[in-house]
Image (spheres, rainbow, N blue to C red):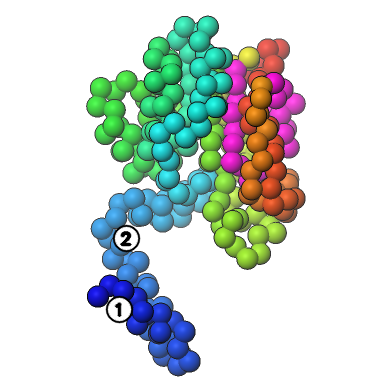
Amino acid sequence: MVGSLKAKLKQLQHSRFRANRLAYHACRVVWFGCRLLVNARLRSETIGPWRHRGVQHQRLTFTKPNRYPLLFEVCRRHCAPLGEPRLLSYGCSTGDEVFSLAERLPTASLVGVDINEWCLAQCRRKDPQHRHAFHHRLSPEFAGGRDFDVILCLAVFQRSEHHKAADNSVAVGQTFAQFEQEISVLDAKLKPGGLFIIDHADFRFTDTACAVRYTPLDFPNNRLLRVRPLYGPDNRKLADQHDSPRVFVKRANCPG
């Protein structure tokens, strides 16, 4: 029955009659509205970017456990001698990144930050013992957080529109200036000698002003080819794929 309904809607979509095509689009709007009413996750992905426009970057909430095992292992090796390291998962989504890092670093202090309230509720639900801290991006707790040994920004500074749009020659929904401003905020929270880890981004960390205080970490696969658009400081597309470094060390003579 569902298949038959989809086929009928498809016929309306491609009908030669304008009224039928309008009916198809009206059905889509009604269906999407019904989904918004019953699906809290979809509401958070749809309404959040509008509420936090200019601040929110990635609008989707997809994540999974142990998504970046190589980068998590780099964190483990860096933090192992530190005793009780402090790590910030920026754009933590529903918390899988925090929990995966906790398995490798059981003595670490882990903080997850996101701008999506629904995601933060899932994080706290998964952490009934309150072993980790989860804060909203606009909270005073995040504003006052400092002295992290590692900051991770994985699949945060990107927009799905850049993959899907027929004309993606100019960055939309997020500008380089917004990206650089957020990088500057995070830079101030990282200790000298700490790791800044960024992957799946639409802009290059090395194009930001604070990048002069960092050196790419020397390890195999710090550069991996990512098939995704790359934009420059003028917000125009530079390439359809790139292999920018993903892990940087803040030089010891640089203030946090």
189 over 120 or under it: above or below: above
Mark number, residue 201: none
Q: Residue at x 51, y 25 (%)?
A: 72
Residue 67 percent coordinates (x, y): 47, 35
- Span shown in magenta: 194-218
* Label 1 element class: helix
Q: Residue at x 43, y 16 (%)?
A: 105
Tell me the quadrant of the picture where the C terminus can be found.
top right
What is the secondary structure assignment of the residue under circle 2?
helix
| In this rendering, position of residue 178 left or right of residue 101 | right
State the quadrant of the N terminus.
bottom left
- The residue at which mark 1 appears reads as 4
Question: Which disc number belongs to residue 36?
Answer: 2
Q: Earlier in the sequence, mark 2 or mark 1?
A: 1
Residue 40 location in percent, x, y?
30, 52
- Residue neighbourhood size for the residue with mark 1, other residues' Cα within 10 Å, grouped as few (<14), some (14–19), many (≥20): few
Residue lying furthest bottom: 17
Residue 120: tell me if it is visible: yes
Q: Is residue 74 magenta?
A: no
Q: Position of residue 231 (x, y in %)?
A: 70, 48
Q: Dot 2, how many residues are within 10 Å of its Cα: few (below 14), some (14-19), or many (20+)?
A: some
Nearest the viewer among 136 and 107 is 107
User: Residue at 40% of width from left, 21% of height from top?
Assistant: 102
In this view, the residue in front, 78 or 118, is 78
Q: Position of residue 241 (x, y in %)?
A: 69, 48
**Is 23 situated left or right of 18 in this image?**
left
